[in-house]
Image (tube, rainbow, N blue to C red):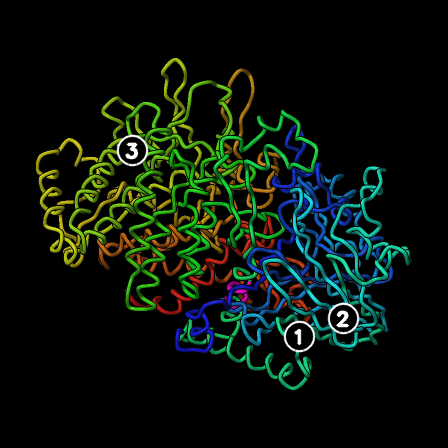
Amino acid sequence: MFNTAEGKRLQASGWKHWGPYLAERQWGTVREDYSPQGAAWDYFTHDQARSRTYRWGEDGIGGISDDQQFLCFAIALWNGQDPILKERLFGLTGSEGNHGEDVKEYYFYLDSTPTHSYMKYLYKYPQAAYPYEALVTENRRRGYDQPEWELLDTGVFDNDRYFDIFVEYAKVNSEDMAIQIHIANRGTEAATLDILPTLWFRNTWSWTPNSTKPSLKAISKQAIEVEHPTLGKRWLYCHDANSLLFTENETNFQHLYGTTNPSPYVKDAFHRYIINNEQTAINPNQVGTKAAALYHLTIPGQTTHTIQLRLVDNDNLQAPFGQEFSDIFTQRQSEADAFYQAVTTSEMDEDMRRVQRQAYAGMLWSKQFFYYDVTNWLKGDATQPSPAPERQRVRNSQWVHLDNADVLSMPDKWEYPWFAAWDLAFHAIPLATIDPEFAKHQLDLMTREWYMHPNGQIPAYEWNFSDVNPPVHAWATWRVYKIEEKLTGKGDLQFLERVFQKLLMNFTWWVNRKDREGNNVFEGGFLGLDNIGVFDRSAPLPTGGYIQQSDGTSWMGMYCLNMLTIALELALTNPVYEDMATKFFEHFIYIANAMNDMGNNGIELWDREDQFYYDVLKLPNNQSIHLKVRSMVGLIPLFAVMTLEPEVMEKVPGFRNRLEWFIDNRPDLRQNVACMRTPGNQERRLLAIVWQDRLREILAKLLDEQEFLGDYGIRALSRYHRDRPYIFTSNEHEYRVDYEPGESSSGLFGGNSNWRGPVWFPVNFLLIESLQKFHRYVGDDFKVECPTGSNNFLNLWEVAAELESRLIRTFLRDSNGNRPLYGTIEKFQNDPHWRDYLLYFEYFHGDNGRGVGANHQTGWTGLVAKLIQQYSEYSGSK
């Protein structure tokens, strides 16, 4: 991989200075919310976004920026029918959608290399008026039990009356970007389109007195000069543009608030000029901080028109659109093909390669510059009115140290245009297979002092940094370390040690904050599983008391083993870490004992009757109740597993001796932990919460198609609850958990997330890894029925491969040529201009594999790229 042209660019400097770092939604974010009550969706709306300047970032369609988002480029569109100039993607807010927020556009990330030397994006733009009001009205009318009303449902794509707009970027060098925009009229009749490739500065001058203001100015009919105090000078060349338009990226106070504008030229000038024909809206002197090249096109039916632009730091190009311009796209695309061919050398069919390549593209396009200084956000800016004091009590006021200005991997740049710590850990795994340095940098950032709280907590996500996500950072750190070691032949020990040292603080935070009784049973609260439980675990319980969490405790068991694994690796070159390894070994033993015995006080998270792990509700009167919901909560104990390799044990004699002493002298603790004394396959030792008899009981349910095993992966809630809902009554109020394989039927967590039956890729990925680890110990002779009751017996490696196959085929064409993720959507299943463009949904219907939730959450669903790689490479081996 590193011997390809793209691989060599990865090892050079400067090639990532420009990339797809522009947000797709800045409006409605917490950063832009200065309301007293924290009503982010309502405080800064989509309708205001065209006229109101952002404080912390910018958004656009198919856009790029430099890595500090000083200068941005994106496209704007008008089909002659829309009520507004389309400068950003539209979607429903949390209160407008019947299942929460949801983007209502069709766009696709088709390709990108890790350095963004080549990128391709597709946006589908209707030729009829965009149905903004109808989408809001109809979805507001619908209840939780009804499907969402999508853009295709409105009829605006009927008879193929739309444009396919492909935006293509190719870097000539690190500071020279060639841009092609191909506009394909898919209809049979000619149609008009105004397209405005737009260049603008993030507003950095309106917030602080005496700030330097950058400038854009026309230097010819088809060239714009850029001057910025940090970026210096550069130029945008616009081939055959009809005209150049200029204004300021500043708020239209008159339109929004009825007050006087400091300048007649404001952010929404191009909208007013194009839609309302206001000739005075744009600056006749052709200077400003926002500029666009206007192309007024009439495109015959079923033909394509191409626009060419070039953003470069050279004002002396003799032929910016000569042969070099044409050749660079061919060359960079060929180099991208060679790079991805080298990433996966094993055989796979064309459709599988397409799924993997677009998954990588989505992950790379979902990088975003994230800027958020919480202290300044709380106190407000010197040139602006002071925020209401109530804001100090809404959210994030305990995170005044947090000051971010980095390019981060986002879950989804429209629905979740902010980092989420546990999402990011999963993102790092597939990213490491194509760009290990970037993956390492992402994990490293989360532990830096401008992210991690001084008390050791890792920030959860922008909506509430204080929420608690599963502690998967150590797992991701180890996996990225091993992936890079496999790619390069050498692991980055400095990275491993640096993150390990900071994770010691985070581990201590967990122990001090989330183990209420000091008995190694953890609460955790939310833990990212949203509405999976009986109660909202982020809020006080209606019963009083607290929940002793099977998943919270198991996550901590997994955390211990991850830290133990890292400590043993570091101990190979520094014996001091043997002491750390011993610490985490002993801590794991106590957690595993608590999971299975609860200190001999009669409370067990393992339910002997059902043979499954459940949460336990601890009431104020000290009564304990198993909350008998068969869910991912009871499968997560499988994640806490590791094998101790004999060759490693030989190299760490201090740790080995302490382990043997513990086994010999603490039988009271040893009895509740999976076998440590008996060597397994190839003399390995096992550390696990779940031992063999319980493993078989859990796997019998996991692999039962009437319970957890679906055609497209493991469901987060057992199908058992379809006919047997779990009901808990307290104070005459009924709390109920039903099997819901698709969209959520409640408004909990905004109504846009559901763990009560769908398939989620991240936890499926961890299940697959856990089964592989168990197999390393138990070997080929340990077999289970898969599916349960089928009389088909597989070893655990083969079971893991079967789960991989089911997850992957969610995206692949079946025997009828249909992709399960698109369900019954005819356009996506059969239309040649739709069927090979893939979306990577947040989660998938537990029965039929249909995509549900955010439809561009390539973030953790991008794990399919890694699954494809390892399935193709290892499905037949051990």
Task: Identify the amino acid type marked 1.
Answer: Asp
Q: Is the magenta stretch mostly helix, strand or loop?
A: helix
Lower position in the chain sequence, tag 2 or tag 1: 2
Task: Identify the amino acid type marked 2.
Answer: Ile
Q: In this view, does 695 lie to the left or right of 320?
A: left
Using a 10 Å C-alpha cutoff, classify the residue at mark 1 as few (fewer than 14 neighbours), some (14 to 19) or many (20 or more). some
> Which of the labelled discs sits on residue 315, or is there none?
1
3D distance between C-alphas at marks 1 and 3: 68 Å
Whether 607 is drawn above or below 172: the answer is above
Residue 77, position as x, y percentages in the image:
78, 62
Which residue is pictured at 57% across the width and 42% down the height?
753
Residue 178, position as x, y percentages in the image:
63, 74
Residue bounds of the magenta highlight: 356-361
Tell me whether the residue at label 1 lies in contact with that at label 3, contact meaning CB atoms closer than 8 angstroms: no
Helix, strand or loop under label 2 = strand
> Which of the labelled discs sits on residue 595, or is there none?
3
3D distance between C-alphas at marks 2 and 1: 10 Å
Residue 701, position as x, y percentages in the image:
38, 44
The residue singled out by tag 2 in the image is 219
Q: Nearer the viewer, mark 1 or mark 3?
A: 1
Which of 515/576 is in front? 576
